[in-house]
Image: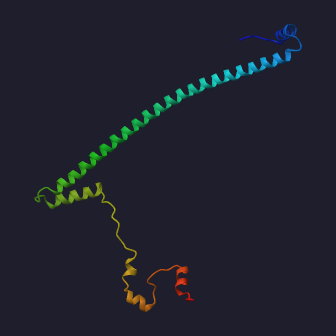
Amino acid sequence: MIDIGISKLALIGAVALVVIGPEKLPRVARTVGTLLGKAQRYVADVKAEVNRSMELDELKKMKESMESAARDVEQSVQSTTSSLEKDWRDATDFESAYSSSDSSTSASDYSSYESSSRSAVTPAYKHPGKNFRLKRTAVPRWYKARSGLRTHVQSGAARVARFRPKR
């Protein structure tokens, strides 16, 4: 780049003072200063744009690598699930084939199969199906009315409104 020291700046200032004159020199210096500021801002904007484009390229490369990694994971998961589904089908097909075979199989064969299937396949959880309202609905309404039990739940405001004297 240009090597400008203090001695060269002083020489340029002296020549500008002689050539331009002392009256126009401040205005020319302001103009030169604003032009240099605009040039510096332009250079900074160009540098920032170049940096952004480089970062954008890096981000695109990173995005592509992440997408390829995600595709690989998805393929491995799909292959694993397909193998699990195949194993499950094989296990359930063996069970159905064993149950649909002749009744000529001996009891010892069936008991050995039962013990091996119990360890391999556990039955699915079934909710006991308890009804929490069963105990309350088992009491007849006539008994509730005779003993003074509430048959309907009311809010406090509804109860006050129900028993408020008529005007």
| Residue 60 place in picture, x, y as percent | 50, 29
State left or right for residue 17 relative to residue 164.
Answer: right
State left or right for residue 90 relative to residue 8.
Answer: left
State left or right for residue 70 relative to residue 35.
Answer: left
Direction front: furthest residue: 167
Which residue lies at the image location 64% right of the left edge and 22% below the top edge? Answer: 47
State left or right for residue 116 relative to residue 27.
Answer: left
Direction bottom: furthest residue: 146
| Residue 111 place in picture, x, y as percent | 20, 60
Q: Quadrant of the C terminus?
A: bottom right
Which residue lies at the image location 42% right of the left edge and 92% below the top edge? Answer: 146
Q: In the figure, residue 123 lies in which quadrant?
A: bottom left
Q: Quadrant of the N terminus?
A: top right
**Viewer-proximal residue among 123 and 133:** 133
Direction right: furthest residue: 22
**Viewer-proximal residue among 154 and 107:** 154
**Viewer-proximal residue among 23 and 109:** 23
User: What number of labels is visible?
Assistant: 0
| Residue 61 place in picture, x, y as percent | 49, 28
Q: In the figure, residue 69 lies in which quadrant?
A: top left
Seen in the picture, residue 28 relative to 79 is either above or below; the reply is above
| Residue 163 place in picture, x, y as percent | 53, 87
Which residue lies at the image location 56% right of the left edge and 87% below the top edge? Answer: 164
The image's colour scheme reads rainbow
Which residue lies at the image location 21% right of the left edge and 54% below the top edge? Answer: 95
